[in-house]
Amino acid sequence: MAETRRSLPSRIWRAIPPGIRAPLGVVSAVIALVWVVLCLIGPQITPHDPLAQNLPLYQPPGVDTLLGTDELGRDVFSRILAGAQVTVGLALLLVVMSMVVGSVLGVVAGFFGRWVDEAIMRFTDLVMAFPTVILAMVTAAALGASLFNAVLAALIVSWPPYARVVRSMVLSLRHQEYVASGRLLGFSPLKSIGVDILPNVAGPTLVMASADIGTAALLLSGLSFLGLGAKPPSPEWGAMVSSAVRHFDKWWMGVFPGLAILTVVICFNFLGDALRDYFDPKGATR
Amino acid sequence: MKHLLPKAMLFAACTALLLSGCGQSGTSGTQAAPASTDQIVIDTTFDMKTIDPGREFEPTAQMLVKAMYDNLLTYGDEDTSTVVPNLATYTANEELTEFTFTLQEGRVFSDGSPVTADDVVFSLTRLTGMKGNPSYLFDGVTVEKIDDMTVKLTTAAPHPALPVVLTAPPLAILNSKVVQANGGTVDENDAAEEWLNANSAGSGPYILESFDVRSQAVLVKNPNYNGPQTPTFEKVIFRNVEPATQKMNVERGDSQVALGLLGDMVSDLADTVKVDSVPSATTVFLIINTDPAISEVTAKPEFWKAVKSAIDYDGLLEVAGSGAIQSTGAVPAQFVGGLPESSRLKRDLEAAKTAAAAAGASGKTITLSYANDIDPTGVSLQTLAERLQVQLAEAGITVELAPAPFATEVDAYRDGKEQIGLWYWIPDYSEGNDYLPYSPGQWMGLRVNWQAGANPAIEALAAELLTTSDPAQRQAKFEEWGNLLLAEGPYVPLLQPGSNVVYSTSITGVYYSPTWIINAAALGVAS
């Protein structure tokens, strides 16, 4: 894969001795799975109502309130559980959408070549030329602060890498003999893409996507942290960290949502790297 | 995925901030409570645009101007209810339309030149002539020099609040020769602001050494000062510091006074510091738009009633923290014109539900707008708004929160575009007259599109109050006006946040003032 710069978790992954990468990948996969499950059932299993303001304010972590309470008397643990649906759920949605948009454009560009390729790739370059966070912030601010707009803004900045990677794979596949013979047999472009190209592109793209879920969560909670995403009283993790900054003497209010974000980012990244190692052993030491 | 490093760094920075909790390093090192009178460090959250007395209108600037300039009249340090002479003594005629001020002999500016009637006339005409934010304070007053040491102020109608107004820092007396030499004029061509942000030209106990509107102001003792104050510290440093960092600094001895702690931060302070929690004179309230074009629902008086009785005021005080009290009405309880405690609004959920239904609020979502990047006097509007949302929901009023930065939201507020707004009012001077613009047709009323003629009884009382001079009559009329506004107005007075002044046990003379927060010249060292 034509990556020139790797994300921070990916570089950490490269620094880990190959011998313990596989077990670490399994651990990451388990934690990632736990978050995905919580994303589905989190709101149903909270010990307290995540929006109810009926507990004493600023309770430190204890027996009844496992991770303490916040400035309005809401249970931090319940809010993190409920927030998994917002943060992880939307991150999954975002990655799927980026993958679909990026892959479609990448396949079209790679398969049809010439001016179609030029047009799509120059547009991709244009989007990638902007600093991601700044572009996402500008988009979200222009559209108005809401979770939907934050996802839209994140989508606008996160599809180009897929387009590039998919295009480069399609370019090399296009001249393979089995693709050419398919075309000679009278396959329409659509059939050729569907039968001969997509199955070969899907694997690496999915691996790339799995490594992206964590960073998508980071981008979305970052936008919420800046006040451009989830609106209060939503238990979005970035928004929780944001309101906790005012109260850093009550450390539990910010540390635990921060740790939730950290585990999601690290685990999904490690999972993605482990999958890549598994499917592409030659590239593992790069 | 590429380009993720900046995001990672952004988050790392936020986390680092969260964990370290130490944004600022102290200028005074980590000495314990000092017995030295060399300098004192005061941490606060800067709310200030300029320190030109004729233009400033924000709390931090009021505090700095108070330390560098003298007014004709002022308040005592401990007793903040009686106006006392400062640069001048005065007599007034019986109708309270003519006030004659006699300047004290021998008072001098920081350059040694005497304070004369010319300086008074220049300073007060400059205030109105520049048409800056505080200019309206002196509207309708003409100032005239009788002789070098005598000045006469005249108003068309009786102006019982004038002595109180004269204590406000924007009405400080400037050295006219020095200010004029640096671009000062008495009209809108005045160009002295820049110079006054780098130098001071007053007769107060301190002079300006350096000033950065975003980070720090340093004042040093005025060697020529010969007024009634006895400043202790050679140097006073005001720093702009995040609230949670202020707490650490003052506990560690990095600073001696912290003025910006939030109400909920003062419950667990170290024993090296003391805290004075008193209700501030800042009022926090809801405004409800009366224009059906903005919202059919909020325009209905039943809806105003529903909101007033839906709110659990004690629940708001819980999140507002130490020192906060429930408002009694539009005017702060401690001012002339304030209502007694018995007037306070109370929660009545059944009445609220009935009124909300009558206003057609069911199934409708009302937008509650507020600024989420400011903490007026230590209470977070964000936190209050989240609590209000839950309380209103219990009465069947669905509210959507619309936080925005102050700089963008304030225009919607001033232009009367908000359905419901959560705002605050810091007094310009300590008197009920300051709050009469809540009446229909006046500038505050227009922020909810409450046009002139909407409530003739309130408007008539407001007009009478402007010209009533007898104190007992004033209080009676104010109570009538205030109770009517409370019952029939589109405003919901919520609370007065606590003012939490935290200071080292070695410091004395910390007296909270609603207008200038604290007087730096009154600070001293405990023996």
Image: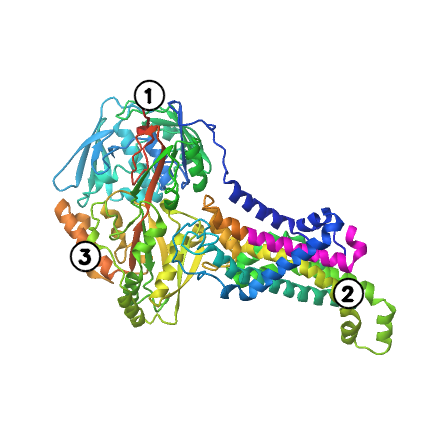
Q: Measure the C-alpha gap from mark 3 to mark 2.
A: 78 Å
Residue A185 picture location, percent across and down: 86, 78
Amino acid on which the number 3 mark rests in the picture:
Ala
Tell me the quarter of the image containing the N terminus of chain A.
Answer: bottom right
Residue B472 picture location, percent across and down: 13, 46
For label 1, count other residues whose C-alpha is less than 10 Å away and answer few (under 14), some (14-19) or many (20+). Answer: some
Q: Earlier in the sequence, mark 3 or mark 1?
A: 1
Same chain? Circles 3 and 1: yes
Q: Which residue is mark 3?
A: B460
Q: Which residue is mark 1?
A: B224
Amino acid on which the number 2 mark rests in the picture:
Gly
Q: Report the magenta residues as a range.
A: A259-286
> On what subunit does the disc labeled 2 rest?
A
Which residue is located at x 25 percent, y 42 percent?
A: B430
> On what subunit does the disc labeled 3 rest?
B
Q: Which residue is mark 2?
A: A110
Q: Residue B357 vs residue A237: left or right?
A: left
| Foreground pick, A184 / A211 | A211
Q: Measure the C-alpha gap from mark 1 to mark 2.
A: 82 Å
